[in-house]
Amino acid sequence: MCGILGLITSSCISSYQEKFSYSLELLSHRGPDYCDFIQERNILLGHTRLAIIDLNQHANQPMLFQDKSILIFNGEIYNYKEIKEELSLQGYVFHTQSDTEVLLCAYDFWGESCVEHLNGMWAFALLDKAKNQLFCSRDRFGEKPFFYYSDSKKVIFASEIKAILPFLDSISVNIPALIPFIVRGNIDCYKNETSFKNIYRLNPSENLIIQLDSLNLQRKFYYQIQQQSIQDSNPAKTLRILLEDSMKLRLRSDVPVGSCLSGGLDSSCINALMAKMLPDKKNFIAIHAKSSLTQSDESEYAKEVAKALDIQLCVIEPTQQEFLSALESVMQTQDEPFGSTSIYMQYFVMQKAKELGIKVMFDGQGADEVFLGY
């Protein structure tokens, strides 16, 4: 993952630079490979990079396209090679192998409708100099975060809430937004409010356009799931084809990849496909976090899957003391209340992946809901 941070103000932009640098540093854990920001007119745009596609320094951000636009982008455009080929036929010349440059050119060619051509996960902000506006977008299912705050003098947006807070005169808790957590134990992500007053999240499948002169914000959806009956004589075969196609695109990476493996339906399907598709699975490692509670221990399932697929399995078992030691770090990372200790287990899995030098981890969500696993 990467980190993005932006500030648009009607007052003196240079007076914010020191605070902006501090806030950008708060996102350094999201992008340890490179950090930079750029000032343009009354805007500051910053980026912390985790290099996955095209490790060359020319793929760093903020990235400029001629003298037309500037982009900061968190995520990955899985079909960037196909879009690149299409745009090359239209005369576009590319200077990097990155999906970031492809996104810049896609906006130049299609405008705001470029997001309709993207297959991927993203949260980005693109400065369109000709229109004097900032075009922001979040992917269809909200995999990548985008938070923002606005008042009469400034608009701030970031990948994490903590990077916005230093710019506020006061910080207040948003009690109504916390009710779903108090009642049900989770945050209601279907609304765009957060646990902090006046800080909002951009919804999945939503664009945000910020006018630089007036600081006016306009939000609009670009995608909605359509309900339809599935007429398929062999749905299992169709599902397999869709999963294989999805995995093939996501395995595009210039760095080592690994996976989470709980032994459940989601992760077992993903690991099975990865074991089949990776050209050399000898260096492929799956990581499992074992619970110290017997009733919650699923490690035997994970071991059975790993054995059947002939892949390496790394099992970690966080102790109670490690849980307590990680408490502050996990809360600092999350920014908002969370309703399950599974967040802790995921934290330890990702920590282990970092130790092993794995930058890309595959994981799955939603299979139990889709296939009635509960």
Image: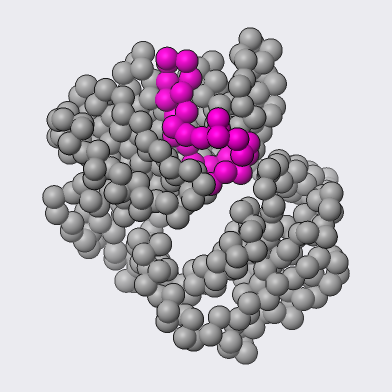
Q: Position of residue 128 (x, y in %)?
A: 38, 20
215 up-or-down from 194: above or below: above
Find the magenta span and give its range.
50-77
In the rendered structure, the answer to whether residue 150 lies left or right of residue 207 reads: left
The quarter holding residue 287 reads: bottom right
Q: Indicate the position of residue 83 as horizontal and vertical percent values.
A: 65, 25
Q: Closest to the observer: 238 or 269? A: 269
Whether residue 70 is in magenta: the answer is yes
Q: Is residue 46 above or below residue 199?
A: above
> Residue 251 placed where, x, y %?
71, 46
Residue 196, can we see it? yes
Q: Residue at x 84, y 65 (%)?
A: 309
Tell which residue pokes out farthest to the front in this image: 57
Task: Give the residue displayed 47% in from the left and 15% down from the top.
Answer: 66
Magenta-drawn stretch contains 212: no
The residue depicted at 69 percent of the width and 54 percent of the height is 257
The residue lying furthest to the bottom in this view is 294
Figure label count = 0
Depth order, front residue of 349/220: 349
**Residue nearest the observer in this picture, 68 or 195:** 68
Q: Tell me the quarter of the image containing the C terminus.
A: bottom right
The residue that appears at 32% across and 71% down in the rendered structure is 182
Classify residue 18 by image quadrant. top left
x, y percent for residue 238: 79, 45
Q: Quadrant of residue 304?
A: bottom right
* Side (left or right) of 101 relative to 301: left
